[in-house]
Image: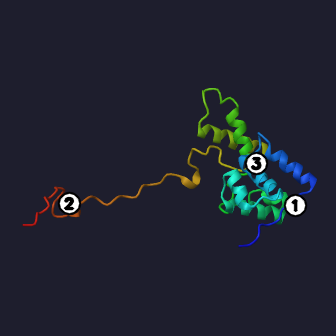
Amino acid sequence: MGEAVVVELDETVRERLIRTATSLKAQVRAVLRARIVLAAAAGLSNGAISRDLAVSVNMVRKWRGRFAASGLKGLKDAARSGRPKTYGHLVRVAVVAAATSSPPHPEATWSHRTIAAQVAHRLRHRFGFPGRPDPGRPGPQTAPGPRPAHPPRHPSFLGPCRGRVRPVPRPT
């Protein structure tokens, strides 16, 4: 087996890690990563750190190596793969602002539809975003037309039993 990666800290980084590790408001994962790095800088082995912090050895190995390679930036979450966000920061702020304000007069509470209409109105009015005036109503592109005729139900479609259930023959 290979040796554990050596972690060395300068004073400013050590202070920042101690502040994170003792913080009551920091994310739990950030506190745990800071504790792992501080223990590694103290010279503890991966096994000892994993026992003390009740985590796996692989987790200790991962965060120790990422800190040694990238410093404090290595302790942040890596970018996730997947579909990009559909809406930007402005839309999120507009939704939160609408949901935390009082609803329009006849409404007692917000619904998904009224929040969507309010956000669409605010964004169109403030930033000039194009959009349909009422997202709940069909526009010209979705105008209702004649419905296609369904084929009639013919009795021959049902087969020879004509809708009746036949008993299952029993082997003799």
Report the Cα–Cα distance between label 3 and label 2: 71 Å
Q: Identify the secondary structure beneath mark 2.
A: helix
Percent x, y of residue 153: 26, 58
Residue 125 in view here: yes
Report the Cα–Cα distance between label 1 and label 3: 18 Å
Report the Cα–Cα distance between label 2 and label 1: 83 Å
- Is residue 24 or residue 86 the one in the foreground? 24
Q: Specify the quadrant of the image occupied by residue 68.
A: bottom right
Q: Of the residues shown, which amino acid type is indicated by label 1?
A: Glu
**Can you tell which mark lies on residue 106?**
none
> As drawn, which residue projects farthest toward the bottom?
1
Q: Identify the secondary structure beneath mark 1.
A: loop
Looking at the image, tell me whether mark 2 or mark 1 is earlier in sequence order.
1
Q: Specify the quadrant of the image occupied by residue 36.
A: bottom right
**Can you tell which mark lies on residue 31?**
3
Q: Nearer the viewer, mark 2 or mark 1?
A: 1
- The reply to whether discs 1 and 3 touch (Cβ–Cβ < 8 Å) is no
Residue 79 in view here: no
Q: Residue at x 92, y 52 (%)?
A: 12
Q: Which residue is mark 1?
A: 8
Q: Of the residues shown, which amino acid type is indicated by label 2?
A: Pro
Q: Which residue is mark 2?
A: 155
Q: Residue at x 79, y 54 (%)?
A: 39
Q: Specify the quadrant of the image occupied by residue 4.
A: bottom right
- The reply to whether discs 3 and 2 touch (Cβ–Cβ < 8 Å) is no
Looking at the image, tell me whether mark 3 or mark 2 is earlier in sequence order.
3
Circle 2 crowding by C-alpha within 10 Å: few under 14, some 14–19, many from 20 = few
Percent x, y of residue 21: 79, 47
Q: Identify the secondary structure beneath mark 3.
A: helix
